[in-house]
Image (cartoon, grey):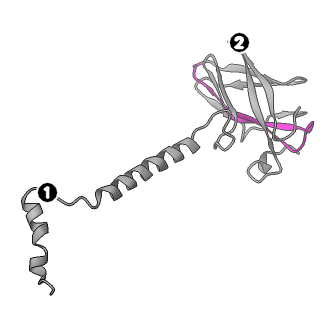
Amino acid sequence: MRLPPHQRRQPERQLRSAGIRRRVRLPLIGAQASGLVALVIAVSSCATGGEDNWNSTAVGDDKSIGALDLRSVLLVTGDEGAAARILGTFENNTDQPIDLTISDDDEETRLTVPGQGSIALDTRETLLRTSGDAPGARTTLVATTADGSVDLLVPVVDGTLDPYRPYLPD
């Protein structure tokens, strides 16, 4: 014989009146929270930059010489030994202009970064006659100012790929 609905719920009502609640959803909420934490950790791990992360938005090297910041420096070329374009941004944090020399094993180029200004090399063509290394490698450039010099370990990127094609030297 089947009980009417109001009698079937009595044990649940008795539990609630005694201060005991059913905890059916708690494991589900805990699993959702654990999944959210795992997702946040996974996404933040993918978004970090650094020398070992070639998937970063800005793959170039970052260094400073005194008050001059060198950001996202890289080379764009079509082949090993071919002409290469230097890309990056140089930011001067002083009121005075800073003379900057960038060199590799066999040549150098000179720039003047204005006081409290910057030079973005995506709009100012700055070339080396030879890249020194093939696309996919990293090569060393030396940046020098009156305050000293730093070695930049820069990626050599393939100028035939769409994102870099506009910067490929002629």
Res 50 → quadrant: top right
- The residue shown at (58%, 44%) is 46
Q: Position of residue 42 (x, y in %)?
A: 53, 46
Q: Can residue 47 be seen by looking at this rendering?
A: no
On residue 149, the disc is none
The magenta segment: 72-95
- In the rendered view, tell whether residue 41 sits above or below residue 4: above
Q: Residue under circle 1?
A: 20
- The residue depicted at 52 percent of the width and 43 percent of the height is 44
The residue furthest right is: 81
Amino acid type assigned to the residue bearing label 1 in the image:
Ile
| Magenta residue check for 77 | yes
| Relative to 82, 167 lies left or right | left
Query: What residue would you read off at disc 2?
Result: 146
Q: CA distance from mark 1 to mark 2?
A: 76 Å
Residue 41 placement (x, y as % from top left): 49, 44
Q: How many marks?
A: 2
Q: Residue furthest bottom?
A: 1
**If the image is split into quadrants, where does the N terminus sit?**
bottom left
Label 1 Cα crowd, 10 Å radius (few <14 / some 14-19 / many 20+): few
